[in-house]
Image: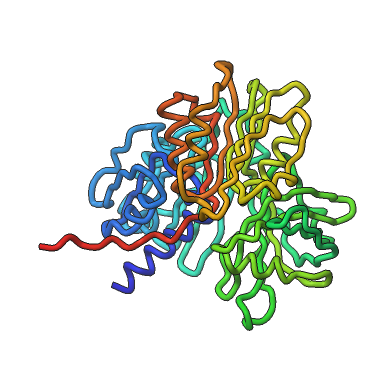
């Protein structure tokens, strides 16, 4: 049993490294997990899951899956290369292949060479305590993403020092942070994110990952935040924190931060890719998404129709985004708990969107975003490559109660 638990834990860690937990739906193929534990977890993220236990042919349809995953299977196969080729071909344009294997096993030495032959781009490779973890992507010719945006993570690591603290609204706290290592970081798109890292209370010093080899470190907290502003020459980055009661660790740190405080960082990742063919942009989210929404909205070219649907607590938060030429629909929830209710979706459903090609970006509570994603793709029939839906956070899920009898 402990072996199964360990295998499941490393598989989920690899998927989170790849960002699969933020997809809020899509097609997922798991190859080699006979216990079904991985399939059960990712189904909870909103994926439709196809499983192969590794004792049978992979036999997956080509170009269908947003994420294809296999952990600790390749080393168990007499010839792993046919299975590898089948998994690579099953990845849809813009999708991910997430692999873990023991490189010391005969037959796995040429995994990377074989993968390169399939046309996938390897953007992260690292040694873990158990073997090799590799993340690869299938280029999407329709998404407008240049090859340099699929890049090793992190580009830069270091320790940031708080130099200024501001409060743009009652629920937003803005920190301006400085580090010499920021000169290594390239910001290619608005709304890119950095990962902030700090030790668990009383656990000692900040421990940083290696450049280009991200892995979560025991004893450290890490959270992703939008780069609100970046001054590479001055070595300054600005990050806005929504004082989210549910995410207590990050909010407590941000509430208490003062100039001179320090936090580790790893940066940065793209969460938005512009589409030159898009004639309009729709941005949807709650306060956790507002920093990205603001960064994207303010970067749209003059004359480009930009629509924002934002749920906040009350009108005092409206000051966070004031922009000429941006059509903003505010939803004030009052004392209602964030991430509950269907008001954002109902407002989106009522929008009269243009028939021309557009670009949609949505983020917030995972079940809310999952439902919105289905609306955009299924009901409105928008092209998949034009919709990005990210689960930034989620309410604790209630355990299922077995039926009597």
Q: Which is more toward the observer, 141 or 39?
A: 39
* The quadrant where residue 92 appears: top left
What residue is rendered at 68% in x and 46% in y? 315
Question: Which residue ends up furthest to the left in the rendered image?
Answer: 405
From the viewer's perspective, tell me whether residue 193 is left or right of residue 54: right
Q: Is residue 297 above or below residue 208?
A: above
From the viewer's perspective, tell me whether residue 66 is left or right of residue 140: left
Q: Is residue 388 above or below residue 127?
A: above
Pick the quarter of the image with the N terminus: bottom left
What residue is rendered at 67% in x and 50% in y? 193
From the viewer's perspective, tell me whether residue 233 is left or right of residue 128: right
Question: Which residue ends up furthest to the top in the rendered image?
Answer: 355
Residue 270 in view: yes
What residue is rendered at 28% in x and 60% in y? 400
Q: Position of residue 297 (x, y in %)?
A: 71, 35
Q: Which is more toward the observer, 164 or 276?
A: 164
Q: Is residue 242 above or below residue 138?
A: below
State the scheme by which the image is colored.
Answer: rainbow
Pick the quarter of the image with the C terminus: bottom left
What residue is rendered at 55% in x and 21% in y? 352
* The quadrant where residue 148 appears: top right
Q: Position of residue 48 (x, y in %)?
A: 34, 42
């Amino acid at each position: 049993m402990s072996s199964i638990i360990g295998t499941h834990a490393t598989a989920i860690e690899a998927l989170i490294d790849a960002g699969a937990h933020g997809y809020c739906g899509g097609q997922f193929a798991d190859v080699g997990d006979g216990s079904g534990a991985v399939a059960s977890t990712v189904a909870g993220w909103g994926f439709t899951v196809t499983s192969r236990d590794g004792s049978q042919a992979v036999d997956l349809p080509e170009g269908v899956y947003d994420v294809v995953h296999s952990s600790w299977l390749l080393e168990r196969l007499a010839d792993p290369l046919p299975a590898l080729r089948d998994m690579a071909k099953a990845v849809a344009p813009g999708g991910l292949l997430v692999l873990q294997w023991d490189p010391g096993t005969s037959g796995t030495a040429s995994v990377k060479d074989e993968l390169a032959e399939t046309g996938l781009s390897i953007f992260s490779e690292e040694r873990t305590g158990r073997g090799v973890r590799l993340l690869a992507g299938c280029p999407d010719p329709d998404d407008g993403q240049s090859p340099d945006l699929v890049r090793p993570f992190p580009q830069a690591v270091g320790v940031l020092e708080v130099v200024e603290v501001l409060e743009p609204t009652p629920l937003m706290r803005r920190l301006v942070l400085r580090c010499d290592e920021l000169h290594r970081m390239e910001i290619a798109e608005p709304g890119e994110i950095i990962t902030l890292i700090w030790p668990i209370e009383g656990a000692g010093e900040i421990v940083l990952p290696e450049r280009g080899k991200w892995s979560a470190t025991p004893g450290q907290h890490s959270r992703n935040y939008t780069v609100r502003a970046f001054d590479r020459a001055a070595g300054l980055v600005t990050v806005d924190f929504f004082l989210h009661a549910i995410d207590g660790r990050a909010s407590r740190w941000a509430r208490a931060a003062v100039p001179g405080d320090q936090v580790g960082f790893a940066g940065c990742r793209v969460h938005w890719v512009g589409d030159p063919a898009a004639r309009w942009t729709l941005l949807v989210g709650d306060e956790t998404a507002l920093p990205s929404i603001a960064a994207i909205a303010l970067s749209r070219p003059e004359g480009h129709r930009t629509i924002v649907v934002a749920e906040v607590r009350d009108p005092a938060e409206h000051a966070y985004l004031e922009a000429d030429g941006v059509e903003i629909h505010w939803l004030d929830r009052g004392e209602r708990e964030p991430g509950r209710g269907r008001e954002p979706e109902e407002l989106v459903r009522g929008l009269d969107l243009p028939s021309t090609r557009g670009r949609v970006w949505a983020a917030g509570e995972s079940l809310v975003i999952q439902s919105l994603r289905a609306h955009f793709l299924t009901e409105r029939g928008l092209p998949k490559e034009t919709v990005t839906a990210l689960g930034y956070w989620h309410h604790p899920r209630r355990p299922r109660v077995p039926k009597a009898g």
